[in-house]
Image: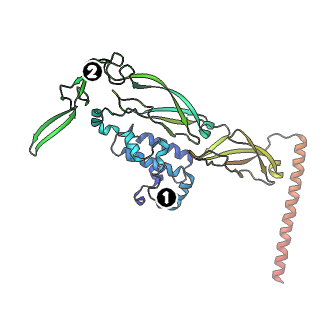
C-alpha cells in the first residue's frame, strides 16, 4: 500500500526544498552504494529499488508537485514503480532480479549450460548538446568473449568430453548426514566438473579449456535524446560471456554530461541568462536569443522590464526521453550596470537623475496636497 511507503525525501536523505542538482547527487551516491552488483548485504536490492522509485518521482517536476501536495496517495497505485526502472534499462522488477541475481540458480544453470555472463560498466562523457539531441558513440572495452577456436566448448576441436567420474555425470555431490532429527541430504556442486557433469580431456589450445578469451571489442552505443547526467544506458548482450557458453551479460554505460558555457538544465527545461542594458530595460527592445538548436530567435523586451524577469520560449527545451515532447527554454534577463561612461553619457545620466528628482518632489507635493484635502473634508 502507498501508505506504508517511506517518505521519498527521507529515502534520498534530502530536504523538501532540495535543488535538482542536489537531488541528482544524492541519488547517484545512494544508487552506487546499494547497487546489487556492489552491495551483497541483505536488503540492498530492496533499498536500491526504493531509491530508484523515489528519484523517478522527485526528478519529475509534475510528479514531485503532486507528491508534495497529496503524498503517495496522489500518485496512484504503485506510485513511481511503472517507469522508474527505465532510467537503468530495466522494464520490470523481474528484469532487475534477472540481471543482478542470476547467480541464485547457478547450479541448475551450469548443468543446463545457460549460465549468464557478467555485466560490464563503462563511464562515458558526452557534451550538453549530445545529451539533449542524442548521439551514437563507439567505445572500446576489454571483455571475455566466446573462443572462436572451440566455439565455447573448451575442448580442442576434434576431441570429445568424458563423463565426470566424481559425480557420475550428475554435476552434484550428495552427502547424507545423520542427526538426532533423522537423515539430511546435503547437495553441493561437483568441484571437478564445476556442475557440468562432463570433463574436458584435451583442452582447447587457444583458450586452455575456458571456452572464452579476452579481447578488446568496439561497441556502438545509441544515446537517446533527452538523457541527463548519471543516467545508465543498457546495451543488451554486450557484456561478458560465461565460461563454456551461456547467455552474455549486459553493458551499462554510465553517462556524465559536460556543462554548457551558456545553458543550464532543470529537468527538461533550459535556463539562459540574457544580459541587457539599462536603456533596453527602460525603453524596451527586440533582441536575438540563442537556443540549444544552434539557432537564434527574436525576443521582445517590453519597456520597463525589471532584472530577473523570465520569458518562456515554449517547446525549445530538452526532448523527453523516448517521446516527441520537449521542455521549454526560460530566458532570464539581467540588467547590467555600466562600469565606464563617456563624458556625454555621464552628462545625459545626470540630467536624467535631475528630472527624476524633480518628478519625485512633485509626486511628494501631490501626495501631501491630496492628504490635506482629504483631512479638510473630514473636519468640514
Q: Earlier in the sequence, mark 1 or mark 2?
A: 1
Choose between 220 and 274: the one closer to the eye: 220
Choose between 161 and 212: the one closer to the eye: 161
Of the two numbered discs 1 and 2 in the rendering, the one whose residue sits closer to the viewer? 2
Q: Is residue 195 left or right of residue 367?
A: left
Q: Is residue 45 above or below residue 238?
A: below
Per the rendering, the mark at residue 131 is: none
Can residue 336 be seen in the rendering of this structure? no
Cα separation, mark 1 vs mark 2, equals 60 Å
Q: Residues within 10 Å of mark 1 (few under 14, many from 20)?
A: some
Q: Who's the residue at 87% across and 63% down the image?
A: 362
Q: Secondary structure at mark 2?
A: loop
Per the rendering, the mark at residue 75 is: 1
Q: Is residue 60 left or right of residue 209?
A: right
Residue 366 location, x and y as percent?
86, 68
Q: Which residue is at the far bottom? A: 380
Locate the N terminus and report the quarter of the image it occupies: bottom left
Residue under label 2? 160
Residue 74 location, x and y as percent?
50, 61
Asked if the residue at tag 2 contacts the one at tag 1, i.e. Cβ–Cβ closer than 8 Å, the answer is no
Q: Who's the residue at 41% across and 43% down the image?
A: 95
Can residue 24 be seen in the rendering of this structure? yes
The number of callouts visible is: 2
Q: Secondary structure at mark 1?
A: helix
Residue 146 location, x and y as percent?
39, 25
Q: Is residue 77 above or below residue 183?
A: below
Q: Which residue is at the far top? A: 205
Q: Residues within 10 Å of mark 2 (few under 14, many from 20)?
A: some
Residue 191 location, x and y as percent?
23, 28
Colouring used for the render = rainbow
Amino acid at each position: 500500500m502507498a501508505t506504508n511507503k517511506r517518505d521519498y525525501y527521507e529515502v534520498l536523505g534530502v530536504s523538501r526544498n532540495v535543488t535538482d542538482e542536489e537531488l541528482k547527487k544524492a541519488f547517484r551516491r545512494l544508487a552506487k552504494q546499494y547497487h546489487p552488483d556492489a552491495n551483497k548485504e541483505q536488503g540492498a536490492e530492496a533499498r536500491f529499488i526504493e531509491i530508484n522509485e523515489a528519484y523517478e518521482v522527485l526528478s519529475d517536476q509534475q510528479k514531485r508537485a503532486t507528491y508534495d501536495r497529496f503524498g503517495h496517495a496522489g500518485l496512484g497505485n504503485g506510485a513511481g514503480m511503472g517507469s522508474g526502472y527505465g532510467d537503468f534499462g530495466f522494464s520490470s522488477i523481474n528484469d532487475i532480479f534477472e540481471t543482478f541475481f542470476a547467480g541464485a540458480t547457478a547450479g541448475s544453470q551450469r548443468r543446463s549450460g545457460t549460465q549468464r555472463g557478467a555485466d560490464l560498466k563503462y563511464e562515458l562523457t558526452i557534451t550538453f548538446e549530445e545529451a539533449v539531441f542524442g548521439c551514437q558513440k563507439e567505445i572500446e572495452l576489454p571483455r571475455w568473449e566466446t573462443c572462436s577456436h572451440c566455439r565455447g566448448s573448451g575442448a580442442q576441436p576434434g576431441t570429445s568430453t568424458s563423463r565426470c567420474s566424481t559425480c557420475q555425470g550428475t554435476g552434484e555431490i550428495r552427502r547424507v548426514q545423520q542427526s538426532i532429527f533423522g537423515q539430511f541430504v546435503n547437495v553441493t556442486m561437483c568441484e571437478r566438473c564445476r556442475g557440468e557433469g562432463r570433463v574436458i580431456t584435451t583442452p582447447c589450445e587457444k583458450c586452455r579449456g575456458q571456452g572464452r578469451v579476452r579481447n578488446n571489442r568496439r561497441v556502438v552505443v545509441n544515446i537517446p535524446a533527452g538523457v541527463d547526467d548519471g543516467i545508465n544506458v543498457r546495451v543488451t548482450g554486450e557484456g561478458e560471456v560465461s565460461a563454456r557458453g551461456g547467455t552474455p551479460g549486459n553493458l551499462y554505460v554510465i553517462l556524465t554530461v559536460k556543462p554548457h558555457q551558456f545553458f543550464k538544465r532543470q529537468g527538461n527545461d533550459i535556463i539562459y541568462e540574457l544580459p541587457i542594458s539599462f536603456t533596453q530595460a527602460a525603453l524596451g527592445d527586440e533582441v536575438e536569443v540563442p537556443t540549444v538548436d544552434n539557432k537564434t530567435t527574436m525576443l521582445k523586451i517590453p519597456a520597463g522590464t525589471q532584472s530577473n524577469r523570465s520569458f518562456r520560449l515554449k517547446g525549445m527545451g530538452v526532448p523527453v526521453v523516448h517521446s516527441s515532447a520537449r521542455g521549454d527554454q526560460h530566458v532570464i534577463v539581467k540588467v547590467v550596470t555600466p562600469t565606464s561612461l563617456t563624458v556625454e553619457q555621464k552628462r545625459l545620466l545626470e540630467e536624467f537623475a535631475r528630472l527624476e528628482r524633480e518628478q519625485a518632489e512633485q509626486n511628494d507635493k501631490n501626495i501631501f496636497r491630496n492628504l490635506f484635502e482629504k483631512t479638510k473634508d473630514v473636519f468640514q
